[in-house]
Image: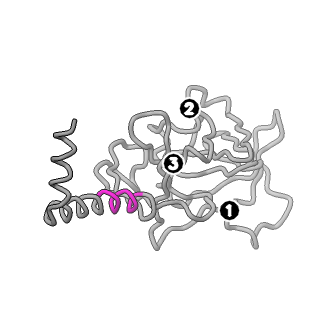
Amino acid sequence: MRQICRFIQKLWKNLLCRTLLATALAVVLGVGAGRVFIGSVYVVEGRSMDPAYPPGTHLYGAPISTPLERGDVVLLDDGKEDYAVKRIIGIPCETVQIWRGQVFINRQMLVEPYLPKHTYTYPMEQAHRGATFILGEREYFVLGDNRTCSSDSRTYGPVERKRIKRRVPSPDDFICAYFAPYTLPAYGKSLIRPAATNLAGAKTAH
C-alpha cells in the first residue's frame, strides 16, 4: 500500500502527468454535462415512427426545459433497454378515446396533419370495441406515427412524466394537431356528431 501511495505521489509531482489527468477529467465532465444540459444523438431502430423518422434516422434528443405539448416527439423509458420514440397525443387530465379509427380528446375529434393520409388508429387487439384512457395529473398518452406497428400507450397505457427523458425538436414546417368540429357520439349511437359550438377560433390543440 505504501508503495502505491509513493507511486501516486511521484506521478502527481510530474507536471505532464498532472496535465494529462486534468485533461482527461475535463473531457469526462464535459461529456457528462453535455448530455445533461445540451443533449445527445440517438439512432432510430424500429418502424413505429415511419415515415417521419424511418430506421437509421439520427435524432437529437434535447433536455426538456418547457412544458410538453401535444404533437411533441419524445424519447421515453418504456421499460426496455433503449429509449422509445413516440409522439404525445394526450396531455395530463385529459380523456383519450379511440373509436372507429379516430382519436378523440375529451370527446372531441383530433386531426393529425403530420400523419400520412388514410392513417387510422385502432386499439390493440380489440379494434371493434374502442378504448378509453383517463390521464392523471402527470400522465401522457403517446402513440407512434405508424399506428399499425407501434407498441405505445394503447399497449402499456399512459406514461408518467418522469419516464419521458428527452424531446426531439420539431421541424420548421411542422403543423400541429387541431380539433375538428365533431364530437364522439353518445353511447349506443354510431354516427359522429357535429360539435355544438363554433371551433374556428380554437383550431390549434396545444
Going by the numbered disc 3, the residue's amino acid type is: Thr
Secondary structure state at the residue bearing disc 1: loop
- Indicate which disc, 3 or 2, sits on the residue closer to the N terminus: 3
Magenta segment's dominant SS is helix
Q: Amino acid at mark 2?
A: Thr
Relative depth, front residue between 119 and 13:
13
Q: Quadrant of the N terminus?
A: top left
The residue at the point 60 percent across, 31 percent down is 127
Q: Residue at x 32, y 51 (%)?
A: 43
**Which dot marks residue 155?**
2
Which residue does the numbered mark 1 point to in the structure image? Answer: 205
Precedes in sequence: disc 1 or disc 2: 2
Which x, y percent locates residue 5?
22, 44
Magenta region, residue range: 28-35
Q: Amino acid at mark 1?
A: Ala
Give the Cα distance between marks 3 and 2: 18 Å
Query: Do labels 1 and 3 touch, CB within 8 Å?
Result: no
Q: Could you say where residue 198 lies in the image, as x and y percent from the top left?
A: 81, 67
Looking at the rendered structure, the secondary structure element under dot 3 is loop
Q: Which residue is mark 3?
A: 119
